[in-house]
Image: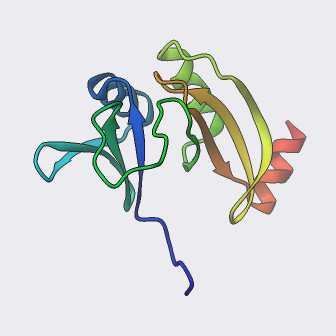
Amino acid sequence: MQIDSLDHLVLTVGDIETTCRFYTRVLGMRVVEFGSGRRALAFGSQKINLHRLHDTIEPCAAVPLPGSADLCLLTSTPMTEILDHLRANDIRPVAGPVERTGARGPILSVYLRDPDGNLLEIANPISHSSREEHHAA
């Protein structure tokens, strides 16, 4: 067997409303409803399903806890705009911008935390030409 792609992942959260507000306001995701009133955060062709702590859907992770995720999300929005947007939303990055290695090559990342303390890495793929621009700055 070989896995081709990621369809969705699940975040266990303390408060679904707070999580939805943060991810839509700060990251531009869309809230979608499915099943019997369940909610998810949609972006691109993926989604993040939301489970409220102590109200998870079976089957679920062995120890579902808010704040235990570490996610890297790619964007084409330039890093300067990302940083301006974070400042405008009173979000102070945990780290970055820093160069990292992503699944498909080098990335320029900034790190922040969501309301539950999950670590979010927001990254721009670095092409050869943008790497030269980044180092020249």
Residue furthest toward the right?
136
The x and y percentages for residue 30 are 29, 42
Q: Would you say 67 lies left or right of 106 here? A: left
Q: Would you say 33 lies left or right of 10 here? A: left
Residue at image point 47% right, 17% down: 89
Report which quarter residue 59 is drawn in: bottom left
Report which quarter residue 79 is drawn in: top right
Q: How is the image coloured?
A: rainbow
Q: Work out whether residue 49 or residue 102 is closer to the camera in this orientation and state it.
A: 49
Residue furthest toward the top?
90
The x and y percentages for residue 98 are 79, 37
The x and y percentages for residue 104 are 69, 66
Q: Would you say 118 lies left or right of 60 here? A: right
Q: Work out whether residue 82 or residue 2 is closer to the camera in this orientation and state it.
A: 2
Residue at image point 48% right, 24% down: 116
Q: Would you place residue 5 above or below residue 53 in this image?
A: below
Q: Quadrant of the C terminus?
A: top right
Q: Would you place residue 1 above or below residue 112 in this image?
A: below
Q: Quadrant of the N terminus?
A: bottom right
Residue furthest toward the bottom?
1
